[in-house]
Image (cartoon, grey):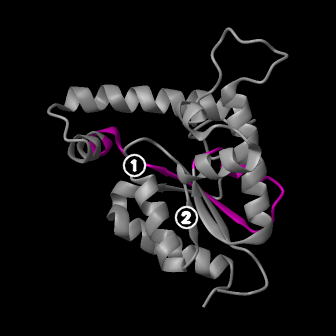
Amino acid sequence: MSDTRNVIVTIGREYGSGGREIGEKLAQRLGINFYDRNLIELAAKRSGLDASSVAHSDEKAPGLFVSGYTPTVSDQLFFAQSDLIRSLADNESFVIVGRCANSVLDGYCDTFDVYIYAPLEDRIERVKERYRLDSAEKARKEIARVDKIRKTYYQYYTEYRWGSKEGFDMLLNSSLLGIDGTVDVLESVVRKNFDIK
């Protein structure tokens, strides 16, 4: 890694596309930190929020019937995570999954923003296998539920449309090359983009 600039890769993803696994493997290959749900505890500790009480609000937009004057738990967690993400970006290289990180880091020159997607049938199979679900219909419903939550969250806190090319440098179908092949492509592009040997 170069000592002169931080390398930050943000990954947005569809549920069941393997985005988290891709991000974790990419971070390992690049020798940099990886952030996902572990950011909740770090942000809570840094901001004085109770980690156990905010965990259920992770990547969820506030409900419809909330006061416009008082920040919700979701708002507090989003703002705490956003502050932490910007602080990390000033001080280290990392790969981060979700958390609207591509939008939070708008204006940072050392970011590479990726969106991972896959055909629905492939996502169904991955979710069925990973969570040991006994039917494709259960997996399909879980995918629809989680994608809806992520879309609502992303579009609530950013100016972008979830799943669109806006706000991303690259969109990748993880089914084309598989998880490891997708990591290979990303590693190659990141190394070239950031001039990493």
Q: In this picture, which residue range is highlighted in magenta?
A: 98-123
- Looking at the rendered image, the quarter that the N terminus falls into is bottom right
* Residue 110 included in the magenta stretch of the image: yes
Q: Residue at coordinates 22% horizontally, 26% vertically from top-left?
A: 137
Q: Give the label, 2 or 1, closer to the camera.
A: 2
Q: Residue at coordinates 66% horizontally, 76% vertically from top-left?
A: 193
Q: Is residue 108 above or below residue 47?
A: below
**Element carrying mark 1:** loop
Closer to the camera, 32 or 170? Answer: 32
**Element carrying mark 2:** strand
Find disc 2 in the rendering and name its residue: 34
Find disc 1 in the rendering and name its residue: 17
- In the picture, measured across the screen, residue 59 lies left or right of residue 193, that is left
Earlier in the chain: of badge 2 and badge 1, it is 1
Q: Is residue 184 above or below residue 105?
A: below
Give coordinates of residue 30: x percent, y percent: 54, 78
Q: Residue at coordinates 68% horizontally, 27% vertically from top-left?
A: 73
